[in-house]
Image (spheres, coloured by chain):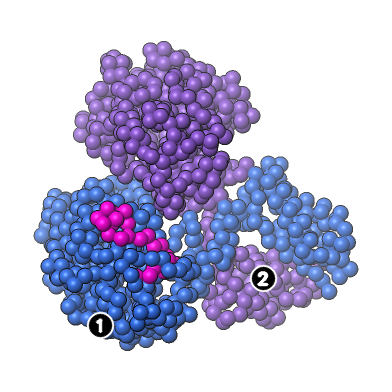
Chain colours: A blue, B purple
Amino acid sequence: MSSDRLMYLPLGGAGEIGMNCYVYGYGPRGKERLIVVDLGVTFPDMDGTPGVDLIFPDIAWLEERADRIDAIFITHAHEDHVGAVGHYWNRLKADVYARPFTANHARRKIEEQGGNPDAVEVVTAWPDQVQVGQFTVGFLPVSHSIPESSALVIDTPAGRIVHTGDFKLDETPVVGEPFDRAAWKDMAQGGVKALVCDSTNVFSLHPGRSEASVGPEIERLVADQTGMVVATTFASNIARVKTLAEAGQRAGRSVCLMGRAMRRMIEAGVQSGVLADFPKTVAPEDASQIPRENLMLIVTGSQGERRAASGQLSRGKYLGLEMAEGDLFLFSSKTIPGNERGVIRVINAFSEMGVDVIDDSSGMYHVSGHANRPDLQEMHALVKPKALIPMHGEHRHLRTHAKLGREAGIASIVAPNGTMVDLTEDVPQVADYVEAGRVYLDGSAYIGALDGVVRDRIRMALNGHVLVTAIIEEGGEPLGDPWCELSGLPEMGSSNAPLAEVLEEDLSQLLNRASNKTLADDEKLEAEFRKIVRQTAQTEIGKKPEVTVVVSRLS
Amino acid sequence: MSSDRLMYLPLGGAGEIGMNCYVYGYGPRGKERLIVVDLGVTFPDMDGTPGVDLIFPDIAWLEERADRIDAIFITHAHEDHVGAVGHYWNRLKADVYARPFTANHARRKIEEQGGNPDAVEVVTAWPDQVQVGQFTVGFLPVSHSIPESSALVIDTPAGRIVHTGDFKLDETPVVGEPFDRAAWKDMAQGGVKALVCDSTNVFSLHPGRSEASVGPEIERLVADQTGMVVATTFASNIARVKTLAEAGQRAGRSVCLMGRAMRRMIEAGVQSGVLADFPKTVAPEDASQIPRENLMLIVTGSQGERRAASGQLSRGKYLGLEMAEGDLFLFSSKTIPGNERGVIRVINAFSEMGVDVIDDSSGMYHVSGHANRPDLQEMHALVKPKALIPMHGEHRHLRTHAKLGREAGIASIVAPNGTMVDLTEDVPQVADYVEAGRVYLDGSAYIGALDGVVRDRIRMALNGHVLVTAIIEEGGEPLGDPWCELSGLPEMGSSNAPLAEVLEEDLSQLLNRASNKTLADDEKLEAEFRKIVRQTAQTEIGKKPEVTVVVSRLS
């Protein structure tokens, strides 16, 4: 027993905000039994991951040890926590535990990827507990921006760990369980070995506001409007969708949900029983018959996504509806860093239509789902852990959160993805570093972040692409002239002739004066071609394109 | 005389923040003499303009009328106002008027592009005026974030126009002229026909703070530090650079400027006489000899640019200096929307080194160079124009600014790029719409935004690229098998064979069963190849790549 150890290993979510995946282990060193907390995704962008569909944590370490996994626990149904369950379940084949609303999502995702949805076990909340191997795990409700979010109380022979998941301290969350200080205090009574804690809002210095504070503001706003009102928020923020819908209803408006995710989330909420009393809605097909001053749309696309309902409306008619002068568009949401350009594009498009837009800058119509700095400090004080391990944050969040812990006298450690931490003793120690990277879902293929595929795409996008073909006869003589095809490059160069022709001219000259040795050697010939293309392009258009050379040899 | 008209035409900067270019005309309809105000650039991004070096306003309309241009006026030396002067002077060949500091930049830019720097005329400030044709133009000092910024007071036979340029109301700007309310009031006394006004900060609801308010905060911060202090701001914000340097000096630190732009700007400031009493600095080569607690670096890279000094320091040693645990990095700057990812990357890299970072979120160490909403209202009240034309803003800024004007009883018009406005009468009227677009500098080539070059790059980046080559013999028979080269695509597909091989197999089959008619028709053959590649790739990797086909015919 004395050689058993308790370990923590983040494979995603520590050093970034997204693709959460945390591993806990207990048992003989190197043979620990494992549980996995969350299997999430993160989203690609044009800057670093053009063309990629989704980004997953690299779970090679886990896969190699799949036989040691006792279970997977999902804290809540946000994509950065549950999004990879479908894709990865087939590789891990462990039981998945989640509360009903989250389980609903996990099941669908596993089913979509051809896995067995029955692997998902629905659990009830704390004080109930699930026993898997030497771990006893309880789902302790927290407030967040999606129903049934839970912290995990993980009991091991070496002590109790509290993994907060995403949380805020909200006693009036509109939908779902209020944050229950008494229950938390009670849970922590017997001593908590480590608090593994959400760090997202560690830079927000004021105490967080309750979800309930948003309703009256939105109601006042909607009541004042004379045109159509359209509001957007994350579809999964069911409390907010309800708040918006109620504001519409109280202002005597028919409420219409637009966008697939929006309708599906509300359905899931009703089905799983977390959402009662949602106002009656009208179908999008019927909405266009209703006078605009009596209509309120709640739509997808809070991040300015082109294909979401907000994006469609910003470009014109969508499902028979069109925004017009005097209408209001409300972002009841925060723009996630990196999405600013898309959101601003939508706002300006609405501005051109004469639509008034209220974005997130006022702070009146949105509250965050994460604990701010004073709330994190309250959580530390409530749980009184021996050790604090910040998670769910970029490095700057983790580091600042750890400082906060130390200021409160708690042993705190910054453990980015791949850092295996030994929690057996009271002071956490780094035990090892393991490979932790990213895997891209690209169409239907999985590619490693370091495979070079995306790097090649970025290079083509930055430099353009020239394709050179040449044919060499059996005897080693060139047959005809080399041929160039350009992609993503200007047609004309500085010598005022088509760039392709100038390149072909220079390549022909090279070919004509090439030695037999060069002509006989594909590699050499390709290198020479590449060099000429890059030199000539540099002269003609001031840039060096990517070059692909195909030499065909007749035989 | 009665048929003469006064017109305003923005070709850049109205409907965006960047690439400012405004045209004023006076004379017989369609034959007006013209003056140009500012010739700026905007910067590319990976989302929409990968590989592009700079973005210019499309001045085709102006070029066609170059013989009618009496002069070009530059309000200040920011790149979005002066950046295109070098590239465009050769096309317009008009005299360029600017105050000394701005003229210094304009001359260098014209010289770099092989134009005649003597075309730049240095002017003195208001109440002096320059007469060109029927325009009499005065440079009325405003406060902004670069020295010698000026509004233009443009007198025409039809009345006085005030073009604010970029401005704020700052009576203690640290460097350069304080905003002089009395002079402005006096200038407006005789009546102002139209105020063409900066709209950047129309969404900032509190009165703007003075540049002088930043100094004491920065001083307090620097005085408290025990490690090396590194601060960044825009190099052109000479007042801020001075404030930072003085804070360093007062804390007993040696000050070192790093980054080419930073050193060049300070030199230009000293040379043109706008900058007196800049603290003594040490050369970067000598800085590494100084104990870190006695050193303050002021560096380029406030927007997280990879190649700037901040970016270099975030990746390791730069000019012999390296940041370490206990050092401070201060962003005395604002992150421009769209640059968040780069800035956050730098912050996290510093966090990993143990460096404390202060970003722009506190608002204590930076003030904006633009007038906030109450300041705009004060400007309206001060100038009392008959008409207001908001400029220097996205559509949402222009629209909101125009609303503000209307609320104050001023005839206000939203005129995005390409909108020709007739100012002859008291109420401005849209007279015409002209083509106003963007031109990209790509390496050394100019490409139209709609030429499809950049679109092709984006497609390659999103979809990858397949290159197919095939050889057809004289008789129309295929010679050998088609050949595929992939770029930016995964190597393996769902059938667990190399994607290139699967594609080649399918293309071979197509070629073998193709009719003589298809084999004889290049276009048809290419279309068939493309179809097969896209179909097979969709099956194998779930995406449809870009395809280039080269069919070589032996003859």
| Residue B532 appears in the rendering | no
- B195 or A81: nearer the eye? A81
Rendered location of residue A210, percent (x, y): 16, 58
Pointer 1 and pointer 2 on the same chain? no
Q: What residue type is labelled 2?
A: Cys
Dot 1: element: strand
| Residue occupying the point 57% across, 70% down | B490
Q: In which quarter of the image is the N terminus of chain B?
A: top left
Of B450 and B103, the residue lying toward us: B103
**Mark 1 and 2 residues: CB-CB less than 8 Å, in contact?**
no
Q: Residue at x 56, y 67 (%)?
A: A451
Q: Left or right of B142: which side holds B282?
A: right
Image position of B149 (left or right of A454): left
In the rendered image, the residue lying farthest to the front is A2
Where residue A18 appears, x then y in whole percent? 37, 64
Residue neighbourhood size for the residue with mark 2, other residues' Cα within 10 Å, grouped as few (<14), some (14–19), many (≥20): many
Pick the front one: B270 or A433: A433
Q: Mark 1 points at which residue?
A: A130
Which of the image's four quarters has the C terminus of chain B? Answer: bottom right
| Magenta region, residue range | A401-423
Decide which of B248, B66 is in the foreground and name it: B248
Q: Whole-percent x and y of residue B416? A: 38, 39
Q: Height in image: B32 above or below A336?
A: above
Residue A228 has which mark? none
Residue at the image point whose x is 26% and y is 80% from the top: A136
Q: Whole-Å distance between the Cαs marked 1 and 2?
A: 54 Å
Count of numbered labels shown in the rendering: 2
Q: Name the residue under label 2.
A: B484
